[in-house]
Amino acid sequence: MDSKIMAVITTQKEQIAGGAPIFIMPNHEKMQRVAITLEKILDGMVHQVTPDILIIVRHH
């Protein structure tokens, strides 16, 4: 099964680099709201990597 990271949502921009779209949010509440919205749009699942980093993964 292939999985692909579709987006990264974080409050800590200095911890993130890479090829997926990165969304920098000012606080955890906004981070959670954006993640839920992107999860629906991208047809993926939100996974928490750290308290400050969420990723949206599409599992095939």
Image (tube, rainbow, N blue to C red):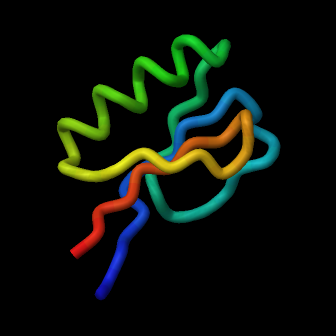
Placement of the C terminus among the 4 image quadrants: bottom left
Q: Where is residue 25 in the image (x, y as percent from the top left)?
A: 59, 21
Q: In which quarter of the image is residue 1?
A: bottom left
Q: Where is residue 23 in the image (x, y as percent from the top left)?
A: 51, 34
User: Residue at horizontal 34%, vertical 50%?
Assistant: 45
| 8 on left or right of 51 | left
User: Residue at horizontal 79%, vertical 47%?
Assistant: 15
| 32 on left or right of 4 | right
Q: Front-most of 30 and 18?
A: 30
Q: Measured along the vertical axis of the image, is residue 44 above or below residue 30?
A: below
Q: Position of residue 13 (x, y in %)?
A: 73, 37
Q: Measured along the vertical axis of the image, is residue 34 above or below residue 46?
A: above
Q: Front-most of 32 and 26?
A: 32
Q: Where is residue 35 in the image (x, y as percent from the top left)?
A: 42, 31
Q: Which residue lies furthest to the bottom in this view?
A: 1
Q: In which quarter of the image is residue 46?
A: top left
User: Residue at horizontal 51%, vertical 64%?
Assistant: 19
Q: In which quarter of the image is residue 6?
A: bottom left
